[in-house]
Amino acid sequence: MKTTRRLLLGGITAAPLSVRAQTARYPDRPVRFVVAYTAGGAADTAARLIGQRLTEKWGVAVVVENRPGGNTLIATQSVQRAPADGTSFLVVSLSFALNPAMIANLPYEPFRDFTAVGLIASVPNILVVHPSFPATTVSEFVEVLRQRPGEIAVAHTGIGTITHLAGELLYEMTNTRVNSVAYGGSAPAHSDVLSGRVPAMFDSSMLPHIQDGRVRALGVTGARRIPSLPNVPTIAEAGYPGYEASSWYGLVARSDTPPAMVESVSAEIRTILRAQDMQETLVSRAFVPADTTPAQFDAFIREEARRWTDLVRKRNIRADA
């Protein structure tokens, strides 16, 4: 009997660390949400809204870490190199899935090295111009581009981001050219657009500046108008049928993160996003709340990659050029 008891206790003590870790309380230490863009943009806002609720629920800090630069590679590799222990998540957008088509020798493969956790929200961009710009409609904007090919500066937050591709889609449809100006994040781009140094931008987080008159909204890039801007048409409505380009933000983790941890975080996020007050907060900021399982988010990322890779190849867009 004593021998059997010792063997049983020995078996418990010798259980693999990975098994014990998965059955322990999770999370039991601070969790990082790594954002590939500067603070203040839509990706950062989405991460902080979810992170705050998770902190309250878990009693463990969720720290949003902004690591812009390198066409999102700095942030991506930060999580790729972190331990696969459920304490590091990457906040991703379209460029995460598109980089393989734009960067040679990319140091990661999205569907091999990472696993989907869940979509947080999508949000249409808005084509905005400085009040001094001579256009009050999308068609007038396009006409200025035609009259001054390659001259008009348009800000974006990096090659292959939706703030870049939303413009490229319109230029492809209208056979126009601009002076495309890349920034390391939304904050510096906003600064130059608000000052008039750069007259235009496609962006999802300019709503407060539209409402206070510091920029003029010409068109919404999504399939529907934004409730807070009911008089601003979609670009499709404005005379460019078939046009649609929305930002989206979600979480991924290293592919070898324990599945139980991935599902736990995904379920928590879905619960948070279903809360009425969270939905109201997101909608007030022009976000469309999501509700996806890891498998559904994985399928969504793959479809977005397929759709936008076609445009990237047609426009010969390279982030490593």
Image (cartoon, rainbow, N blue to C red):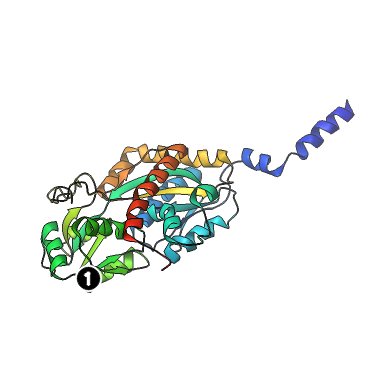
| Location of residue 241 with respect to 95 vertically, above or below | above
Q: Position of residue 210 (x, y in %)?
A: 18, 59
Query: What type is the residue that disc 1 sits on?
Result: Gly
51 vs 248, nearest the viewer: 248
Q: Position of residue 127 (x, y in %)?
A: 21, 58
| Location of residue 131 with respect to 308 vertically, above or below | below
What residue is pinned by disc 1?
150
At horizontal 31% and vertical 42% (from top left) the residue drawn is 279
| Quadrant housing the C terminus | bottom left
Q: Is residue 254 visible?
A: no
| Quadrant housing the N terminus | top right
Side of 167 where 4 appears, left or right:
right
Q: Position of residue 246 (x, y in %)?
A: 29, 50
Q: Is residue 168 visible?
A: yes
Side of 247 where 117 appears, left or right:
right
Which residue is situated farthest in the top direction here? 1
* SS type, badge 1: loop
At horizontal 32% and vertical 47% (from top left) the residue drawn is 122
148 vs 198, nearest the viewer: 148
At horizontal 12% and vertical 58% (from top left) the residue drawn is 139
What is the crowding at mark 1: few (fewer than 14 residues within 10 Å), some, or many (at least 20)? few
Number of numbered discs overlaid on the protein picture:
1
Which residue is situated farthest in the bottom direction here? 197
Q: Position of residue 18 (x, y in %)?
A: 67, 43
317 vs 155, nearest the viewer: 317
